[in-house]
Structures are given as C-alpha cells and as structure tokens.
Image: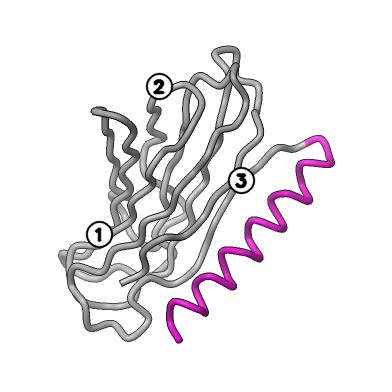
C-alpha cells in the first residue's frame, strides 16, 4: 500500500514536471513522504533517472526536508552512476533551504538516485533533479521508482 501511494505521488510529480517542460521553465521535482509509518530507521527510496540525450553531461540534484526538525534526523540524497557517487544532506530540516546542489558527470544513460534518512520517523521530502548538457541545457529525462522500503 505505501509503495503504491509513493508511486502515485511520484507519477503525479513526474506528470506535473513534464507539463512544465512545455513552458519556459524546465523543472523536475519529486516530493512525498518517506517512511510513512515512521518506524524504519534505514528507510530507503531508490529511483532510476534516465538522461536520454547523447549530449547530456550530468545529473544535478538537491534534497529538501519539509518536515519539522527532529534531533539527530536528517535526509540524504546520493547520486550514483558507474563507479562514481556523490551525496548531500539537508543540514537544517524544516527550513526553506535545501541541501547543497550536487553534480554527477556521467553523460547520458541511467543514474541511481538514493534517498534515505538517519533515524525512525516520517519525513516529507522534495528532490529537484535535472539532466543537463555541459552548457546547462535540459535534456530528455525519465524517472522510475524501484525501491521504497
């Protein structure tokens, strides 16, 4: 049930992101709860992001914890492709800021986006991600959830 709810949220976010591609702004964002029951300290979300265009240079992303601060609880984002990985943490949960934006230069193809948290409890997060050319031009992007546990 929880996985189905997350998939629906993700599909809606992707649909809305795709609709914004028709306009001037090219934003990709997913948002929703992780560990809705709040009892899995190691709850992990894995999404596959595909950057289709051969001119793609990198995937850039950041994560924002939208939940009120809880002592010792943080949300993390890791991008992984090939033998390379980079990660970031939202340092202040519940504020308007996000983690630093991270960049993984892996060209076109499949990237893994991994989201996790540091202790039990529900977190609501938002992730902005973009497939970009070397000059910062958006390329065709797809996202698919593979793990939500």
- Between label 1 and label 3, give the one nearer the viewer: 3
Determine the secondary structure under disc 1.
loop
Q: Is residue 57 above or below residue 18?
A: above
In the image, taking residue 26 as reference, residue 125 lies left or right, namely left
Residue in the image at 26% along x and 78% along y: 121
Q: Earlier in the sequence, mark 2 or mark 1?
A: 1
Q: What kind of secondary structure does the magenta stretch mostly adopt?
A: helix
Q: Position of residue 22 (x, y in %)?
A: 83, 41
Rounded to the nearest whole Å, what is the CA distance between mark 1 and mark 3? 22 Å
Tell me what residue is drawn at x 21 percent, y 77 percent.
40
Query: Please, what secondary structure does the residue beneath circle 3 have?
Result: loop
What residue sits right under mark 3 in the picture?
28
**Which region shows up in magenta?**
1-24
Quadrant of the drawing holding the C terminus: bottom left
Point out which mark residue 105 bears. 2
**Real-space Cα separation, disc 2 to disc 1, in angstroms:** 25 Å
Give the percent coordinates (x, y) of residue 110. 45, 37
Badge 2 element:
loop
**Residue ID at (60%, 16%):** 55
Looking at the image, residue 84 sits to the left or right of residue 108; the answer is left
| Left or right of 57, for residue 20 | right
| Image quadrant containing the N terminus | bottom left
Q: Which residue is most to the top?
A: 135
Mark nearest the camera among 2 and 3 is: 2
Q: Earlier in the sequence, mark 2 or mark 3?
A: 3
- Residue under label 1, please give it: 74
Q: Evaluate if marks 2 and 3 touch, with contact meaning CB atoms under 8 Å apart.
A: no
């Amino acid at each position: 049930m929880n996985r189905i709810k997350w998939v629906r949220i993700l599909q809606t976010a992707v649909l809305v992101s795709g609709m914004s591609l028709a306009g001037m702004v090219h934003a990709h964002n997913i948002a929703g709860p992780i560990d809705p029951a709040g009892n899995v300290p190691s709850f992990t979300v894995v999404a596959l992001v595909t950057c289709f265009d051969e001119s793609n240079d990198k995937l850039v992303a950041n994560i924002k914890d939208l939940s009120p601060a809880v002592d010792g609880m943080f949300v993390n984002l890791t991008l992984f492709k090939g033998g390379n990985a980079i990660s970031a943490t939202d340092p202040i949960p519940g504020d308007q800021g996000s983690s630093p934006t991270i960049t993984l230069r892996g060209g076109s193809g499949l990237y893994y986006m991994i989201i996790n948290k540091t202790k039990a409890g529900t977190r609501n997060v938002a992730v902005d991600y973009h497939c970009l050319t070397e000059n910062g031009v958006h390329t065709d992007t797809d996202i698919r959830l593979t793990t939500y546990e």
